[in-house]
Each structure stands twice: as C-alpha cells, then as structure tokens.
Amino acid sequence: MATSPSLHPEDEESLCEPVHEQPPANLRRYASNSTSQVAIIGSNICPIESLDYEIMENDFFKQDWRTRGRAHIVRYVILKWTLCLLIGILAGAVGFFNNLAIENLAGFKFLRISNLMLANKYLMAFGVFASSNFVLIIFSVIITSYIAPAAAGSGIPEVRAYLNGVDAPDIFSPSTLLVKIVGCIAAVSSSLHVGKAGPMVHVGACIAALFDNERLHKYRLTGKWLKYLNNDRDRRDLVTCGASAGVAAAFRSPLGGVLFALESLSSWWRSSLLWRAFFTTAVVAIVLRELIDVCIRGKCGLFGKGGLIMFDVTSTTIVYHLVDLPLVILLGVIGGILGSLYNFLMEKVLKIYKDINEKGIGCRLVLAGAISLITSCLLFALPWFASCQPCPDSTKEGCQRIGRTGNFKNFQCPSNYYNDLASLFFSTNDDSIRNLYSSGSHELFDQYSIIISFLVSYFLGIVSYGVVSPAGLFVPIILTGAIYGRCVGMLMGSRSSLDHGLYAVLGSASFLGGTMRMTVSVCVIILELTNNLLLLPLVMLVLLISKTVADSFSGNIYDLILQLKGIPYLKGHTEPYMRQLTVSGVAMGPLRIFNGVEKVSNIVHVLKTTGHHGFPVIDEPPFSSTPVLFGLVLRSHLIVLLKKRDFLPTCRLTSAGITKAYSSDDFAKKSSGKGDRIEDIELSEEEMEMFIDLHPFTNTSPFTVVETMSLAKALILFREVGLRHLLVVPKISSRSPVVGILTRHDFMPEHIFGLHPLLMKGRWKKLKFEGSPFVRYFRGLLLGSANNSISSEF
Amino acid sequence: MATSPSLHPEDEESLCEPVHEQPPANLRRYASNSTSQVAIIGSNICPIESLDYEIMENDFFKQDWRTRGRAHIVRYVILKWTLCLLIGILAGAVGFFNNLAIENLAGFKFLRISNLMLANKYLMAFGVFASSNFVLIIFSVIITSYIAPAAAGSGIPEVRAYLNGVDAPDIFSPSTLLVKIVGCIAAVSSSLHVGKAGPMVHVGACIAALFDNERLHKYRLTGKWLKYLNNDRDRRDLVTCGASAGVAAAFRSPLGGVLFALESLSSWWRSSLLWRAFFTTAVVAIVLRELIDVCIRGKCGLFGKGGLIMFDVTSTTIVYHLVDLPLVILLGVIGGILGSLYNFLMEKVLKIYKDINEKGIGCRLVLAGAISLITSCLLFALPWFASCQPCPDSTKEGCQRIGRTGNFKNFQCPSNYYNDLASLFFSTNDDSIRNLYSSGSHELFDQYSIIISFLVSYFLGIVSYGVVSPAGLFVPIILTGAIYGRCVGMLMGSRSSLDHGLYAVLGSASFLGGTMRMTVSVCVIILELTNNLLLLPLVMLVLLISKTVADSFSGNIYDLILQLKGIPYLKGHTEPYMRQLTVSGVAMGPLRIFNGVEKVSNIVHVLKTTGHHGFPVIDEPPFSSTPVLFGLVLRSHLIVLLKKRDFLPTCRLTSAGITKAYSSDDFAKKSSGKGDRIEDIELSEEEMEMFIDLHPFTNTSPFTVVETMSLAKALILFREVGLRHLLVVPKISSRSPVVGILTRHDFMPEHIFGLHPLLMKGRWKKLKFEGSPFVRYFRGLLLGSANNSISSEF
C-alpha cells in the first residue's frame, strides 16, 4: 500500500488554486469571510453556527438506516406526536400561568394604589406605584443579565434565526426558559410598556427544545425512544411546533399560531408539519380552555375573565357600508406611515441602547430604572389633566370601589366618577385593549385623553423594548393601534357610522401591518381574538393597505432587529445583484481538503487551525486514476473518529466491517454548540502518524454547483434544500475537482459587498452596464484566458 | 474561424458514452424512458409536458432584465394584485351563479314533483323525476365529451398535477371553464350523487388561467401590462390563487380556501403567495356576501338562504365532556375504516369506468344514463318504506305545502306528516346537510331511515363519480359522513349527551379525514361552515384519528386518481429505495448535445427526431481547450431562433449586438402546449448549412448533480427548486462534461422499477443486503474499474 500524500499547507494552496491565476486586487479571493461569526442573542454576543438539514448519506448512515425496521418507524412517528402533545400541554400551562401571575401581580399593585388613592394618599400611591415598578423591572434585568442573557428581548428574532438555520449556545436552554417566564412576568407587571406575546413564542420554542435528546441525556432522562431525535431537521420541526404553540397560548388563537409560524417564523415548511403544528396548537387551546374553566369558578385570585385576551366585539353585529370604505383606507394609510415611523425610531433607539447595554450590568440597570421611572411618572402625572366623567350605567363592571379593581378607575375623581386616562393607564394592557375594543362605548373616552394616551403609548413602546429583560412588542403595538383607531373614530365623529370598538380593532390591524408586516397571521389572530369572522374583509383591507404603505418606507421590525443583532439570516428571495455574480466570485479559499485515506496528524492540524465544519474529501492516486471528489466529511464526524482512535497503521482502505465499531448515536448531531472540541482530544505521537479511512464516513452525495453558476441560483438551491455546505466544482475538467465551498456567510450582503465594493452603489438598483462584461467573462473563461475583466468592471 | 465539428449521430453516441463501457444487460442504460408521456386529463388521453419554473439565466435574459426599471416592477406588482382582485370577483360571481342555478333548477324539479305527489300522481311524479334527471345528466355528458373532455371529473387532480408541474393542453381553456360550469350545474341538479365543490376548484383555476397573456392575445385583449405574465412561475401563482378562490367560493370559507390550496393542491409555496391567495379569497367572501344580500331580499327565485352551505350549529353552545371522548375516538376509527374502504371501492369502480368511457361517446352515455336511472329508482323507491312522522312545530321551515319546497317533504304521507327519508333524498345535498347538522333535532330522523340513507349515499357516491361530466367528490363525502355521524349518535342513544347535529359534523370530519386525508384545511372549512371555533378540538381529534387509521389501509383518494390517470406527479418525499440508487442509474441516453456554435441542419435534425425540451450546450475546441459544459438551451428558444432565421454564414461567435434583433416577447413561454412546432418551420438548403451561435441564448446556470449523487437527494433538489431539467455531470473529470439529463419521468417509480426490476420486490421495504455492494460500487468507480457489480446485485 502506498502512503497517502501528506497534506502540507503548500499543497493545500495548490489544491485550492483559484480560477484566475492573477486575481485582481479588489477581488480578494484569498480574503477570509468578512462577515461576523458572532451575533447578539438576547443581550449577549455569542458565537453562532449554522444548522445542517442535509442528510449525510455516507456508507455508515446507509447501513445504519437499512437496519431500521418498521417498528423503528412506528416508534419514531408515535414519539413525534407524543412530543407535540407534551409541548402543547406545557405551552398551554405556561401561557396560563404567565397570565395568572401577571394579572395577580399587577392586579394587586393596582388594587393597593387604588385604595390609597381613594383614601386621598396620593403621594404614597405614587411612591408605591413607582417603587414596585422599579423593583420589578430591576429584578427582571438582574436575573436576565446574570442567569440567561439569551432571554432578553422578545425572542422572536432568535426563534426566527434558529428556524432559518442559525444556532447559538443557550438560545433554548432550560435557564433561558425559566428566566424568560419569570422575567417576563416581572417586566409586564411593572407597567413597562412591553408585551408577553413575544416571550411566549420563545418560551414555546424553549419548551420544545427541552425534549432534545442531548439535553435530556444530561439529566439522565433519555430513553431508547428519544434517541431518534438526534438531528437538526427533527429539532427544527419540534421548535416550529413549539413556537406555534407559544403564539397560540399568548393569544388563545390556535389557527393564528400555526399561521404565524408559517408566515413569519419558519423558513422551511412541509405539509405534514402544518398538521403537527396545528395539532399542537389545538392541544394548547384545549388546555387553556380547561384551565380557564377552573378560573371562572373564581379560584384564581384576581385573574378572572381577563388575562388571556379574548375580546368580544360581537355583542352587536358588525355593520358597515361602502361609504365607510374611504375612511378605512385612510386609516390604513396613516397606520402604515405611523408604523414605519415606529420601526424607524425603534431602530435608532435600539442602536443607542445596544451601546449602553454593552457597557455592563450597571448601565443596563440604570437604563431600565430610568425608563421605569419615566413610565411611572408619565402614567401617574398625566391623568391629573383629564377631566372626571360620571360613571356609565351601561357597563357591567362599573366604577372601581375599595377592595376591587374595576374597568373604570376614579383616580382623583369623586365617587361615581371616573378618569378615562387613568382607566387606560392603570390596568394591564389586556384590560386596556378590552376596554378599547368594546362596542357601544363612544362616549366613554374623551378626545383629548385618547390623543394623549396615543402619544404616550407610542413613545413608551419605542423606548421600552430595548431593556435587557424578556419583553415583547406585540401587545404594545396592538394597544397603540387600538388607541390610534379610536382617535380616528373620534375625529370622524358623526361622519361615520362605524362603531368605535371596530375602529379600535382596525387601528390595531393597521398598526400591526405597518410595523410587523405580517398579514395572514395577524388577520387570523385578530379574527380569533374577536371571534368574529365577519370582520375579515375590513381587517384584511386595512392590513393590505398599511403593509403596502409601510413597505415603501422601511423594512419590517423583525428584519431590522435581526440586522441589528448581526444574525446571518438567509432570505428566501434573491437580490438583483446576485444574478450578476457567479459563485466563484464569492466562494473563497484557502480550501482545506482531505484525502480519502488521511493521516491523523493532518486531520488534527486542519481541525485545530480552521473553524470550518465541512471538508471535501478527494481521492487521489493510487486510489483513483485522477483526483476525484469523493464527498464531504463533517468536523463533528471527524472528531468522533478521532475520539474512537480506531486508526489504520498504513494508508489503505478499511474493510467493510470497520463501521461496526460505531453506533449511530456516536454520530448524532449535538444540540446548540454542545459538541466535543478538537482541543479536548489528546493523541499520542504514534497515533498521529496513523491513518483514517474517511470513505465510510463521507457524505458521498454532497450538493454541488458549477463555478459559473449565478449566485442567485446557488442561493435558491442553498436555501430551498436547507444546506450548510455547498461545494463549488470547476467548469473546466482539468483542475482540482472542487474549487470552493459556499456557506451561509458567503451569501450575506456584507460579505459580497466587501468583495465587490462597486456593487454597493447599485445595491438595490440594477447594474446598468451594457451586457458585454458577462459575455466577455464567459468567453474568457471558455477560452481559458486568465485576464478577464469582470472584477474591474464591477 | 474553424468550422464547427458536425454532429452526426455517431458523434453523439460517443459524447453520451456511459459510465461503464460494457453496461450489464439488465441496466438498460440505453432504453428510452418507459413511463408514459400521456395522461388522462378529464376524460381524454392527452400528451403532457412539464412546466419549467427555473429562471433561464442566459445573456439575453440578463440584458433584457437589466433594462427593466422601477416602473416596470411597480406595474408588475400592481398587475398581480389586480389580477387577484379580478379572479376573486369572478370566482365569487361564478360560485354564486352556480349555486343560484342549481338551487333553482333542482328546486323547480323538486317543487314540480312535490306538487304531483301532493296530488297523488305518484307515477307521473316518478316519470318527471327520472326523465328530468336523465336529460340533465345526458346533456352534461354530451357537452363534456364533445366540447371539453378536460372538464370531466372534479378537476382537483388536474389542478394538483398542474401545480406540481404537469401541463396538458386545454386543461384550463375557456371551453373547459364553460363546460365545467354548465355541466356541473346540470349534473348536480340531476340528483346524481356528486358535488359542486371540486369543479369549483377547477373553475377557479380556469378563471385564473383566463388572464394568461397568450390566451388574451388570441382574443386581442393583450396590453402592455399583461406581457409580464409570460412564464410558468407567474402562471402557477395565479392558478394557485384561482384554486384557493374556487374552494373559498364553494364553501364560503376564505381561510379554508387558502389552507386547502396550501395543504393539498400546491407543491410550492411562498410567504408572499400566502398573502395574495388570502386576499383573493377575502374578495370572494366579500363578493358572495354582497350577492347573497341581494338574494335575502328575495330576488333570486328559489335560492334563498340555501345554496352556499353555511350551516349553523351555534344556536346552542356546544357542550361536551371528557366522558364523550371514547365515543368520539370510536367514531373516528370507524370513519377512517369506512373512508379507506370508500377509496378502495372507488378505485375499483373507476378502473372499470375508465375502460367503458374509453370505448366512445355511446358507452359514456349508456353508463351515465344507467347510473342516473338507478339513482332515480333508489331515491324514489326507498322512501316508501319509511314511516310517516308528524311535522315538528319547532322547525321554522315546517312541512312542505303546495307551491313551496320545505325542508321536510311529506312524500306519500298525509298532510302535516313528513317522510324523513324523502326529506334527505328529495332536496339538494346542501339542504340535506343543513338538516343533518341542525342541532336539537334528535327526534327528526328515524334510525332505520338514517341507516338506509347511509347505505344509499355510500353506494351512490362510489358509482356516481366516474361519469364523464363535471362532478365533485367533496359534498357527497360530507353528506355521507354526516349521515354516518347521525347513525352513530342514534346507536348510542341516551348513553351520550352530545347533540346529534354535532355527531353529524364529526361524522363528516371523520369521513373526510378517511377519504381525502386532508386535515388542516378540512378542519378549517368545517369550522368556517359551522362558524363555531369551539368545535375545533373535537373536529381535530376526529380528523387525526380517522386519517391515521385510513392511512394504514390505503392512499388518499386524489393520489389514487392521479395514479389512475397516469399523471407523473412528483411527490415531495423520497422513497427508501431512492437512497440506494445513484442518478447515473436512472439518467439515460442517448443524450442530444449541441455545440456552442451549431449548424442549423443539426439543430433541425435533433429537434425533429427527439421530443426533448432541453439540450446541453458544450463548447469544444477551438472555442475552448477541452470540451466544457456551457449550459442548457431550450427547445422553445431554439425554435424561436430558427423562425427568426438570423443565422451566421460561418462557424464563429456572434457579436454582442445580435441579441438586439430579439425582444423578450419572442422568448416568452407559451401557455399549455401552444408553442410553435419544429415541423412548421421551413428552411432552405442554404439556410440549413448556416450556423447559430447558441451562447447568448443558453442558460449558463443550469442546476447540476454529480453522477454519484443519490437519487433521493437529486429528487429533493429537483422538487424543491422546481426544475424541468437537471444535468448529470461526471465524477471523473476526463470524460464528456455531461453524462445525462434527469427529468420528471426519471423519478417516477415505474421508470425506476423498469430499470431495476429487482427493486420491485422490496419496493416499500428497505433493501436488506448487507451494505457491501455500495462500498464496492463506489470503490469500483473510484478505481476506474468498469466491472462493478452493482447492477447485477440489485
């Protein structure tokens, strides 16, 4: 047996020789990828990795897979459904608990203040209000910062990134789950203008990730059954179901939950997943229903009908006519403008906050405390300017009395009068929204109160989200939108016959459309919240208009946040400039390549000196007549091989039986950055001189593209199939069988513009040169000429 | 300039030389694809073609595309939304018209019979009933057979096939649309046990296809705007929206429509399409609402509340307890078994009918007439065995009187009595379903009547679908299921507290789950039909159980029909045996290849002698140093080039300006088999000796796979990206740059099993050989040995 040619760095260089012998200076083919390999997850900067959805079709996998019988498949299917059931039950229970806790915590706070106010102890009331808010938010910031920084924020961008294939450590860890629940309860109870829906999405995803094999293994809970869920595809499916369950639990909206996940969370979707997600959300709905039934019997403290927003504007049948349409359109247009302005301001504020939060825990606490104090002052000071109104007889709740918290707060007003501004400010967001949505309540709110509360809500929504604490955007936006809708309704006065409650619903829709740009799911959530399918046409019209208007100003808020966080999110559509580039223009060296039978020392060296996760395996003479691409081997698999130390003394092919030394568990994908590291493996001098036959562990069916493939098409392949590595093979057959590897980062605009700075000018435009460079480029490539001019013309 | 090497058949052979020099006999690499290139569309056998969703990135496209400005994009977006609006309006109007016509036609028929029955003219009543049914169905069969055979059946399989990428002539032509509407009205009015929902889906798709550029061009309606919709991608999106609109119009279920299209019609889906489809269905909902408002004022003849099924079981709040669950589970299990039996019997019956229908129009008429007569006899004879019951006071409709058709028919009974069986048989399916779904109606139906009507409905549903006439499956299945549900409810008697109307709803769900195996969409449609979100958990449970049970017996009904029709439907998942095969095992020669600059006579020869639609373009010396793959050129583009006669006198590269002679309209994809044929192009001797430079018109970014790629992964790529051609490139670089082309047919099980008959034995199982053949195969390939043994071991 001949020895394998050793792979010195110089050899590598020659293997990954570029297409053009003299690369133009600004092409920078040897530059390392300029995009960042870290991102902000929650509030901390973490290293991130890509997930791998490709099936590694190596010999070992095929053998293992052939031994699986029918029983295995049945178990696998039952397991998946059982897990969905468990996720649904847990998400429903957590959603219920969240609401119960918030309603009781905030309710107790408001009750105490209201009692003090009724006793005319105004200063003390403010003291209690401000200090309890301050303590709650500081508590939330402290546990988030110290225990689980990944729990900060709404978590929706993180879940979205995960489902797009970006993994980060601790993103779904049990501590994140715990902090997310507790921190969210504290933050929302502290009257901070943040919501609990976003965190519920993250909570749902965390719950799903609890059932991850690896994690259970740590707690010695793993069984024979769970071992099937050992790859990123199954985890992705579980997390998708979990996130759907989270939305469903937050809004008590099973259909809306599934559609939310489908529309704005997940990047890949299958018909079977649709059904599983739907099952999960239905379980959530059942669990919530049963638990709320318990509460209706009055066993849940201050948590009665409230908590789970379930508005009811159906008491009167919705009536609308064609004459109302112009008004609805106007509402949509203004809502779109306000929404995109909201996004714009939010982005600016988040940038400032990011710098503050990065300075340390002290700065975080100061920021959160300041915002809490501002919020407390605003909420307490403004109602003094509102006039007192007599209590309505019509509402069942009536005005508040000592010992109970009604929907209408009297604040500084005499008995049997109420302060409308205080009624909006001194209750949980859910109650405020319910008040605003209620029909037949034209007279309940004063025009100026509504305008003031809109400004306050708009402003507080923007400044509150950035604190380092679990906090959502959804509910504040719904509330602000509802106030905005009432505003429009009031300004119209008698010119419109629409109910003001309906205006509030449409205002919420327009604001959601303007900020989040979600359409179908928002529409369905609103329908399910209001339990009225007849609203559909109007809600849809408003959403369509506000989204269209807002889209022409700025991006959607989650995209903006993803960008701020530096997450390499792979978009589903291609940008115009990508059609102007070929994959060889972005795939860069130096490429690390292994031989089919490779020396241990080479493998260790390459693994230690690079951060790559996939390596092409090339067979060279004597194993083949010419160098030929055998496949792709993964870093994680190589580490397993090195750990096993089952090396060959000489450079030869292994016998077929060798793979029996391994079980499929050895190669199971570890979850979220938990894999073994090369640094932890100690090998002796002797072992370093031995060989490994990589053939049985190499994925023999890697996806490939020819180097002249346009970047746009490569992106489509990469994204649709859900790849982590895409091999670039040469067009002209006389060269090395692989010339590059494309990964997620190679498709990021920052990377591409770094390589081709001139593209930047025409980034969102088309490049207006007259066609010839490409013709020349391809001709040049065909004729083997090295001095093509494409790079200089870009 | 040197002359291009001419491409004689012998040269081709050498170009497409197989991997193995001596292919084993049973590998049959040269065999032509054994799967059929025709399929049954509607009732006729038509040639079928694949659709092409890939963007042809050739120089010409890129130039054309670079000249498009912002205005172009805005126009394009506005156009797409406008078309969705129009599709929605038209689909809503057609759905309304359909219902109006059916209700009035059938209503008039039933009224006439009821008047005769009340006058005791029983024989004459039967005569009128049977003859009117006979005439209506014969009329429907005649127009379908003569005018548009593609309109026969429900059309859902055809729409599904189209959205999967299978095109057939006339599938969406205006005549198909017309016949579908008229024929469906006639068939449903004829008391045949068929539905109108399935045809509505096809109608929606036809309406969408009306706006196809090509078709409008024919009627001189095309404008500057419409020219953008000239590719299969945009057509697919429009048809998806149209089909959603059809479902929405059939069930007045906007959400259900979108989810139906998402779950069971379309094979590709994007988030933006979700929104557009939803918009379309919302328009449908608005249009229907407005039109029904007109009818409520009594301007629509016999069409009042009925027609559009909108059941209302919400009058009483649904109450159910945990003790009812076992019963619901039992209902689901039996429903699943009955459903899969339904599919099984349906398949057998359709096979027989297929042979009969293929014999000609006479046989079709005899078959349809016989079924109509059997139906008439059964429906008229059986109610005589039912007992008369006193009219209930509770129901608003009350018993029928002369001159009006009530919900309760008295048939042979005295005045103020009704015949429950006749009440189910002598009304439209919609009315029957409404009766069955109505709550608080335990006493209205006799146990034996329900059992008899179940048997009749089950039997007639199976035998009626196969007639050559537009006819759906959906409504009969809902009806049969509702009767089945009532049956179970009655058998339970007092042991269950559930309402019998609720049993009927659950029965429908279980039957739909058992036959169609759709889950989310059926669930949503039922929720929207009954306008009661509280039903969700029960409906979902029943669907889950019945689908699971039925799945273990047989496939879903649309898959069975697709298979019967011989449509090469590309499934989304891979079969186990596909992992055992490499693409080189199924991609077959002889491959037709063009040179970069090709002689006209060669192109004409190849186009005339093959039916291929895509040809690899290879550059050979002197245009490149070694043979190198330049890209893929399409037959349709070649024909455009030949028609233009802009040939080169010598074999040389063309100047960049040459493409200016063409406009993008020239290369627009023609719709449904309307393209020019090579036979229609007459070229002179002189022209035949000239050359064409194919470079500017060749797609330089075709998707490629390496020949050792497993078939499963190639299928994933093919399906996810939506390809028509997938080039297979060699692994070892010294050979021809392309060794095969994979098309849709190469992934069909029939083709694969034809090549590898031994796979058949283990078709749905795994292959149990012990791993070594693959290892040996790959080794063999690597070592360049020709005598590998894989084929003989399969």
Image (spheres, coloured by chain):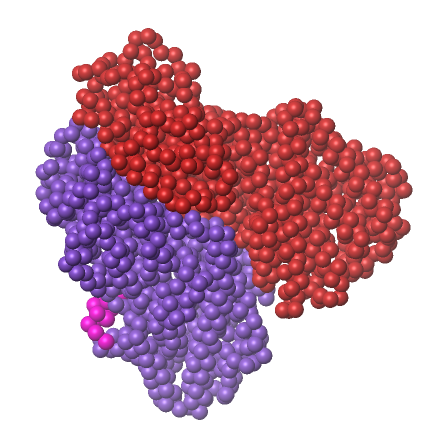
Chain colours: A red, B purple
Q: Quadrant of the N terminus of chain B?
A: top left
Q: Nearer the viewer, residue B731 or B474?
A: B731
Please say if A710 is above or below B534: above
The reply to whether residue A459 is in sight is: yes
Q: Give the percent coordinates (x, y) of residue B749.
A: 24, 49
The reply to whether residue A240 is in sight is: no
Q: Give the percent coordinates (x, y) of residue B291.
A: 54, 73
Q: Is residue A25 left or right of residue A559?
A: left
Q: Is residue B348 magenta?
A: yes
Q: Quadrant of the C terminus of chain B?
A: top left
Q: Is residue A692 magenta?
A: no
At a point 48% along the width and 60% down the height, the residue shown is B79
Q: Is residue A61 left or right of residue A656?
A: right
Tell me the magenta residue range: B347-361
Please say if A248 is above or below B157: above
At a point 83% along the width and 56% down the height, the residue shown is A391
The number of callouts visible is: 0
Q: Give the percent coordinates (x, y) of residue A364.
A: 68, 28
